[in-house]
Image (spheres, coloured by chain):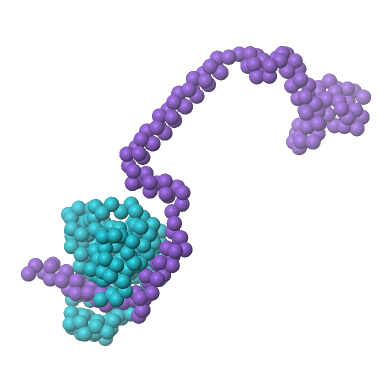
Chain colours: A cyan, B purple
Amino acid sequence: MPIAKLQFDKPDLDAETPLDEITDMQLVEMARHENISAYDELVRRYQERIYATVYHMTSNHEDANDLTQDTFVKAYRAIKSFKGDSSFYTWIYRIAVNKTINFLKQRKNRVHMSLNDLDFQAENDPDLVALVSDKTPRRELGLAELQEKLNSAMQKLSEHHRMVVTLHDIQGLSHEEIGNIMDCNVGTVRSRLFYARQQMQALLSDYLK
Amino acid sequence: MNPEQENFDALRKLLSLKRHEVPPPGYFDHLPRRISTRIYAHEGAPSFFESIMEWFRVNASLAYAFSLTACGALAVSIIYGARAEGARADAQPRDLAVSWVGRDANALASEVSESTRHELHTANWVANTNPASPSYGLPSLFARPMQPATMQTAYEAFSN
């Protein structure tokens, strides 16, 4: 639980209200009045998810770092135009997705992977252990190599297909949420997901038998 | 279970490996401070044009009104421009010369003709580098420097 307290400039909020009891919309309202502390709290709430989305799209930590910062800076500049039609979460995701897709289109095929390390829980994940020990044709293949193959396969997908796989299969968002973020209908999300999975399956067939 | 679905399940299990990829330790502790530093430094602040576009995006009805006004002004300027062009094309060149300069067109024409002759004389030997073209004006460069380069001059040069 966050310990710090915010200095409120909104009369309807108690100055001693803990951070985690303040809703996103209240924080947005305060950030609109140029309260950077409130915006900091919004950054803390969503930084991991935004970073993860961008990282899985780029497979590069430095690019993900730059794009995550750009996303939050741009969102702060545009927060006065945020009408509240969607949640802040959807809105910030939309900015990140658009920024990332534009970046990838400019980068085109110049893929340079700079992968993050796996956490210690990966070695104990039963699904992954089974994949490495039983289903992999080359039994000696380690998790790090599997990670590289997986990222290479993802980079072969188009930006929109990769985004759907990232948001659904890695981050666990629903089809409806993805539709709102990517500004398309649920049918499009489903068909993109199916096509992307088929492609991934073909690319990683050696590791899925 | 559908075999295709089963294969997708295997793929999803493999994709779960991505969830274990984490940035360097302490990365998320410093990120909010980096972002607020960039905000304080006014980095990424919108330009004047971006501010205008953002204002139009928020005030869509005013944007429509502005674009309609701009289109109307453009259409009016094109129509009046075409009419003025037509009226100018109908006028006689002599009338135009009198109206523009405000003095007699014959006097203007003689001045223009005289100055052109002089320019032709100097340009004849300075600018003409074509070896196939006649160089009738050249003798006059030393003998009679200000002699205009005409057919009469050439005849005199050869006959002498």
Left or right, residue B79 beside residue A205: right
Is the residue A151 above or below the residue A26 in the image? Answer: below
Give coordinates of residue A145: x percent, y percent: 30, 80
Residue A76 visible: no
The x and y percentages for residue A82 are 30, 54
In which quadrant is the C terminus of chain B drawn? top right
For the point 30% across and 80% down, the residue is A118
| B124 on left or right of B5 | right
User: Can you give x and y, in whole percent of width and height, for residue B95 in the image?
Assistant: 63, 13
Residue depicted at 73% across the width and 18% down the height: B108
Location of residue B64 (image quadrant): top left
Quarter holding residue B45: bottom left
Which quarter of the picture shows residue A191?
Answer: bottom left
**In the displayed structure, does residue A181 sit left or right of residue A112?**
left
Above or below for B104 versus A96: above
Q: Is residue B9 visible?
A: yes
Q: Residue at the left extreme?
A: B1
Quadrant, the N terminus of chain B: bottom left
Nearer-the-camera pick, B4 or B104: B104
Please provide percent x and percent y for residue B76.
44, 26
State whether residue B24 is above or below residue A68: below
* Number of numbered markers: 0
Q: Nearer the viewer, residue B42 or A158?
A: B42
Q: Pick whichever, B149 or B92, lies toward us.
A: B92
- Name the residue rendered at 81%, 23% in the picture: B150
Q: Give the residue drawn at x 48%, y 22%.
A: B80
